[in-house]
Amino acid sequence: MRILFKGNMSDIAIKVENISKKYQIGENKNFPTLRDKLMELPNRIFKGPRKNKEFWALKDVSFEVKQGEVVGIIGRNGAGKSTLLKILARITEPTSGKITMYGRVASMLEVGTGFNQELTGRENIYLNGAIIGMKRAEIEKKFADIVAFSGVEKFLDTPVKHYSSGMYVRLAFAVSAHLDADILLVDEVLAVGDAEFQKKCLGKMSSLANSGKTVIFVSHNIGAIKSLCSHCLWINNGVSVMYGFTEQVMSSYIQSVNKLDIDKSKNSSLSSTKYSFTMKMPYWVDDKNKVTYSYNYGQNITLRFEFNFKKIVENLCIGYSLVNQYGEKLFFSHSIDDHRSNIPSRLLGKVVIDSAIDIGCIPPGTYQVPFGLKNKQGEAIIYSEKDVFLEIKPPKNDIDGRGGTFWYTGNWKIK
Amino acid sequence: MTEQITIIKPTSKLQFINLKELWPYRELLFSFVKRDIQVRYRQTVIGGLWAIIQPLSTMVIFSFFFGRLAGISGGGVPYPIFSYAGLLLWTYFTSAISASSASMVASSSLITKVYFPRIIIPISATMTGLIDYLVASIVLVGLMLYYQIMPTAYILLVPVTLLLTWMLAMGMGFWLSAMNVKYRDIGYILPFFIQLLLFVTPVIYPSSIAPNFKFLLSLNPMTGIIDAHRAMILGGLPINWGSLAISTVLVVVILLSGSAYFKSVEKYFADII
């Protein structure tokens, strides 16, 4: 019994118990000056302490992570993902609750934290290494690897202010990537650099994930989370909604985000007061008009926009694109680049607009679908980056490692 | 392998500096000091000379106006070396408190992105100036040779006064840097405050010129330290041990209260900075 108990304990890497974080809002300034405090004094004396509005960024969040698990934290903007990560990284303190972490913890909330423009690449490697928690001996040991990974050998003794932004990011990521720890906290590190570099980062991330390290990963990029994480925590409005295997949590999450019950939920309906119309969050439908977000490879899919125009709107342009897990845009389509488009230039009342995609060339994966509306002058009326998703399942006869950014099966026939 | 366990929960009780917690971060402390020195010496054309020019030019001006025109005595030693011995430590003290009080705000990008004991930031800011102190002491040696002043064995105690000054600068740095995060007024008040402080500290005059205010003056912790520092270097002057003892007590009080205040507001830094 005892041995079993012990085994279970050492299995756990992170234990989060009832973590809550409260912020005070209503202080109208970020930096109250002494004057503000003094001006407030008479009010305090006569009316009692000022009541600030309280805002719970996190409320009673609990979960456990076992050693070697890679956990993604998902949720909408402002759901509390970053707050949770900041508490785990000890940047800010929880209001209540307790977290226990077993092992050396390293956080990568940003690459190149503390890089100094005046210092050379070499000096910055040592400085940044020390800041993120590496010992000097450790940096010396890994120095050659870091330099090789970054690919800036030639400019090692040049101040980083002369670096291109690409070189800068590569060097910064290289240091972070060589930080040796049992538990890694990662935030949106992949949101930097070009697509090629993001692939390299993602590759490094998955090798870390496969090396038995425990990783907590916060990202908006659900494609990346899906390919890296074994488990997922879904947070909404500071409350943990679901925790479990990525497949299950992710499909519930995407379903909820793409949820049809739009009118009931304020979050998923959009409106423009200037043009006085409302619209539902765009959603996908299949051949049979059934709402879905997940398609088998090769199926025809359609993105549907539903509007209610209270006044006439002229020359509305609707556009969307598909963005893959590396942040690469597959394509961009808008309602006036199709010459066959039959959308009238004046719109009024309830209007449903469909955009059908021949999906055959899009590789399986999970995509983010940023969409937007523009007026005649090209001014954005509505823009949303992270609310619509699309999942394309691989074909049953998929040959492993087909790869490629463009899927084309070709027409095979005997002549 | 020894397993490291991190526990995160809200802190509530009064805390002072936790040296045990700081020890693993000593390399980071020196990295910060090294960075500040490297950056400063790289950005300036004459680098280390600035450390000398500031106290030296102040000494020359004060020697002319106070020493020659106003006729203030150096209490037994020539006025230029008298004031330089004071200005040497004073320059370190004021640059250390200005640097440390601005240090937290200047490091906001670190504070919101990575964890380490925050108190390292104001501590490191007080240490950079020690190099300047050493560089500027070269001039003092030159002046002593010129005026043919023989140091006594007391000169070996000079590091004690430097240590006390450092502790005082840290204590004030903890107070001011933490307050500056919340109230940016500190950045405006401080230069003015330092300017006033020069006149209530016996830097450029001997404390003997104001016998009636001796007690009041000794409530300024720098009084005892500056007097002792100068007396230990120049030999000819008597050391006022009583005044130094008062200073030591005040330094300890400021250092402990400063660290307690810093620790108590530290947890909000990332949220409000």
Image (tube, coloured by chain):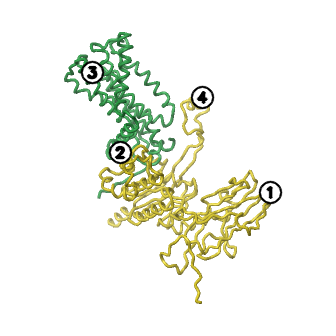
Q: Mark 2 and mark 4: span between their CA atoms?
A: 45 Å
The lab-note entry on whether marks 2 and 4 share a chain reads no
State the hue of chain B.
green
A114 sits left or right of B246 in the view: right
Q: Are marks 4 and 1 in contact (CB under 8 Å)?
A: no
- Pinpoint residue B202: horizontal percent, then vertical percent: 35, 18
The lab-note entry on whether marks 2 and 1 share a chain reads no
Examine the rendered structure and indicate whether residue B199 appears above or below residue B32. above
The lab-note entry on whether marks 2 and 3 share a chain reads yes
State the hue of chain A.
yellow
Residue at the disc numbered 1: A312
Residue at the disc numbered 3: B143
- Pinpoint residue B74: horizontal percent, then vertical percent: 31, 14
Query: Mark 4: which secondary structure?
Result: helix
Identify residue type, mark 4.
Answer: Pro
Identify residue type, mark 1.
Answer: Ile
The lab-note entry on whether marks 4 and 1 share a chain reads yes
Residue nearer the viewer, A275 or A315: A315
- N-terminal-most mark, 4 or 1: 4
Examine the rendered structure and indicate whether residue A35 appears above or below residue A410. above
| Residue pictured at 71% horizontal, 55% vertical | A271
Q: Are marks 2 and 1 in contact (CB under 8 Å)?
A: no
